[in-house]
């Protein structure tokens, strides 16, 4: 291999350039480079350490969520509007492992209903039965071991949360008291209910995809991972992607390759496509970008999960959690029954919100929290590339709470949580909600106002380059040769659960298709 000015052995013209080493990109690159005959170059905007010891302890401690800490060095912030009157800062990971390095470590599979919906639009390749072997291959389930549903040899260690913590045990008893079924394995496609949360946590360490997949492969001579390398656009010549323009330490250059795969995440991948001339013609022309391919579905819509945090005051001090910040989770269908697999999520935090935002596990005297979200698979968001300058972030309008159904669902989720906290069983550990107060809880209008004032997001953005209208089932961009997308952009709708496990799945599926030359 040719040496570069940076002293790395960058292949002269890699077979595949992977843009972004996040939830999907790290997986894709590691799997592709299992074939010694294929050279793979990964260009990652954030730092790309070569050893887990170079990850700050706070990036590994599964009792913390680095992305919740304002201004954390491993995240990229974006200004957004959750509703027209609710400005908000959303974040994505910018480090080896991408958002899986800064996220909550909740690692729950999408539901069969999600796969049915995606395969209806994107092709039978996405049916649950076709996906199950990949779901097994990506994990080592440390609770179940290898069986018909779970994997025993994959890179992601999966461990369910411990429900012995007094607050988690009280949540379980309260859920049982209110008649919610138990859901002991949230990766088994059973009826939604209360159960422990599958996490990508091993011995208290959140194993991001950089560590789980890429570092173990870093000795391969056919794989090179370059950090601090921001891709600015794809070079397309005569309808074929031939390379990327990249900026590294203030210097710009073009790297040529046989195929380009964009894995920059659901916010950056569509922007990169737009800046490369692939997107809605009128929008691109308004930016002064030459149109390569009129693709109206690229970078137009997105979906995510609205969330509010409900805090309750422990009656007496509770212990710090041992392995993960997460306790139990309750999933339930909202009252219209549209999603029997459950579109409401009540997720228990055993670390105070002030600790999650402050980067510390213990905050004596602080309330604990439930993260309450609506996970309806809906594309309410709209994005727009605002400038031909890659440094200008896209405009993001989440469109949350824009329908009566959205508002009703979130009210329902808040009220179910209030009902749980109000049980005598939960009262064993809790002195009750800090807010909303009963008067607000009982009044739809007041509760809507409270929710709007406290509205946040789960940071689960999907759907900006959807399977079907924008890419084929294996991520190939329609109308441009040698260019793919492999990240959560391609999910036509967000899943009914958090997308991290699905991001890993996407990396596995697209790598498999490329290795087998599937058409
Ligand atoms: C704070 C937070 C908490 C979350 N918690 C959970 C959770 O607990 N469970 C769950 O299921 N989901 C969670 N998520 C969502 C989940 O982590 C993401 O959906 C998933 O990681 C997305 O994978 P991805 O590959 O699409 O993008 P990412 O993982 O975001 O990866 C994109 C990568 O591309 C790089 N990149 C971007 N632009 C460029 C460029 N121009 N050039 C080169 N590289 C570039 C980025 O630096 C990044 O490394 C959370 C997300 C956040 C932000």
Image (cartoon, helix red, strand yellow):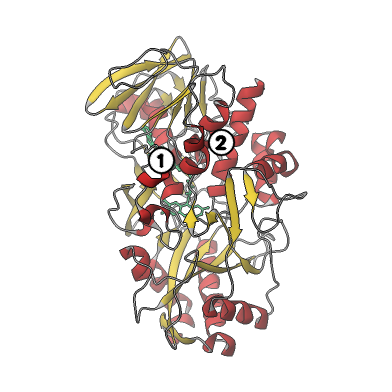
Contact flag, marks 2 and 1 (Cβ < 8 Å): no
Give me the residue at 28% from left, 32% from top.
Answer: 387
Residue tagged 1:
51
Instruction: Where is residue 424? Give x, y as percent.
Output: 57, 90
**Which residue is identified by label 2?**
507
Give neighbour class at mark 1: few <14, some 14-19, many 20+ (Cα, 10 Å): few
Q: Quadrant of the C terminus?
A: top right
Judged from the image, the secondary structure of the residue bearing numbered disc 2 is: helix
Work out which residue is located at the far right of the displayed protein and give it.
Answer: 148
Residue 472 image-quadrant placement: top right
Residue at disc 1, CB closer than 8 Å to ligand 1: no
In this rendered view, identify the residue nearer to me: 158 or 341.
158
Q: Residue visible at 54% across and 70% down? A: 413
Specify few, some or many for label 2: CA neighbours under 10 Å numbering under 14, 14-19, or 20 or more: many
- Image coordinates of residue 407 in percent, x first then y, are 49, 65
Kindly report the distance in space between the C-alpha atoms of the residues bearing marks 2 and 1: 22 Å
In this rendering, does residue 48 appear at all? yes
Residue 3's disc number: none
Compared with 470, 111 (above or below) is below
Does the beta carbon of the residue at mark 2 sit less than 8 Å from ligand 1? yes
Quadrant assignment for the N terminus = top left
Q: Nearer the viewer, mark 2 or mark 1?
A: 1
Q: Is residue 356 left or right of residue 516?
A: left
Can you give x and y, in whole percent of width and height, for residue 4 in the image? 32, 16
Which corner quadrant of the figure contains ligand 1? top left
Residue at image coords 67%, 40%: 134
Q: Secondary structure at mark 1?
A: loop
Q: Position of residue 52 (x, y in %)?
A: 42, 45
| Pointer 2 or 1: first along the chain | 1
Give left or right: position of 115 versus 213.
right
Residue 127 seen anywhere in this rendered image of the structure: no
Residue occupying the point 30% across, 36% down = 386
């Amino acid at each position: 291999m040719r040496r570069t000015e940076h002293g790395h052995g960058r292949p002269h013209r890699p077979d595949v350039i992977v843009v972004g080493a996040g939830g999907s990109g790290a997986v894709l690159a590691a799997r592709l480079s299992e074939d010694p005959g294929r050279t793979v170059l990964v260009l990652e905007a954030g730092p790309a350490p070569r050893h887990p010891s170079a990850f700050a302890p706070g990036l590994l401690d599964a009792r913390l969520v680095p992305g919740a800490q304002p201004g954390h060095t491993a995240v990229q912030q974006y200004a957004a509007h959750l509703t027209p009157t609710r400005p908000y800062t959303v974040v994505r990971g910018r480090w080896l492992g991408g958002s899986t390095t800064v996220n909550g470590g909740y690692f729950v599979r999408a539901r069969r209903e999600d796969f049915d919906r995606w395969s209806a639009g994107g092709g039978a390749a996405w049916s649950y039965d076709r996906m199950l072997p990949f779901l097994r291959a990506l994990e080592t389930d440390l609770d179940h071991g290898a069986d018909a549903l779970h994997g025993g040899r994959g890179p992601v260690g999966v461990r369910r949360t411990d429900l012995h913590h007094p607050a988690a045990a009280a949540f379980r008893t309260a859920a049982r008291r209110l008649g919610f079924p138990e859901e002991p394995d949230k990766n088994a496609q059973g009826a939604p209910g209360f159960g422990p949360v599958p996490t990508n946590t091993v011995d208290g360490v959140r194993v991001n995809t950089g560590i789980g997949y890429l570092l173990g492969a870093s000795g391969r001579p056919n794989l090179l991972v370059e950090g601090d390398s921001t891709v600015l656009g794809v070079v397309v010549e005569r309808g074929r992607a031939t390379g990327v323009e990249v900026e590294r330490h203030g210097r710009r250059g073009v790297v040529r390759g046989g195929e380009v795969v964009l894995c920059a995440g659901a916010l950056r991948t569509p922007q990169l496509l737009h800046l490369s001339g692939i997107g809605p013609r009128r929008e691109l022309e308004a930016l002064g970008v030459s149109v390569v391919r009129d693709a109206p579905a690229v970078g137009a819509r997105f979906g995510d999960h609205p969330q509010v945090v409900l805090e309750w005051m422990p009656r007496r001090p509770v212990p710090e959690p041992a392995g993960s910040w997460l306790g139990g989770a309750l999933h339930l269908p909202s009252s219209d029954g549209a999603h029997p697999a459950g579109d409401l999520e009540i997720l228990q935090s055993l670390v105070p919100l002030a600790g999650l935002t402050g980067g510390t596990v213990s905050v004596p005297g602080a309330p604990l929290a439930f993260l309450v979200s609506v996970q309806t698979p809906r594309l309410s968001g709209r994005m727009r590339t605002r400038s031909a300058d890659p440094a200008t972030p896209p405009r993001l309008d989440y469109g949350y709470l824009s329908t009566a159904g959205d508002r009703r669902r979130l009210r329902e989720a808040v009220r179910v949580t209030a009902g749980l906290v109000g049980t005598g069983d939960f009262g064993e550990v809790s002195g009750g909600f800090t807010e909303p107060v009963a008067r607000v809880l009982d009044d739809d209008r007041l509760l809507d106002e409270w929710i709007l004032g406290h509205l946040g997001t789960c940071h689960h953005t999907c759907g900006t380059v959807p399977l079907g209208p924008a890419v084929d089932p294996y991520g190939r961009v329609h109308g441009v040769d040698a260019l793919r997308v492999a990240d959560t952009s391609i999910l036509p709708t967000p899943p009914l659960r958090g997308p991290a496990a699905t991001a890993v799945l996407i990396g596995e599926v697209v790598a498999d298709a490329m290795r087998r030359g599937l058409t």
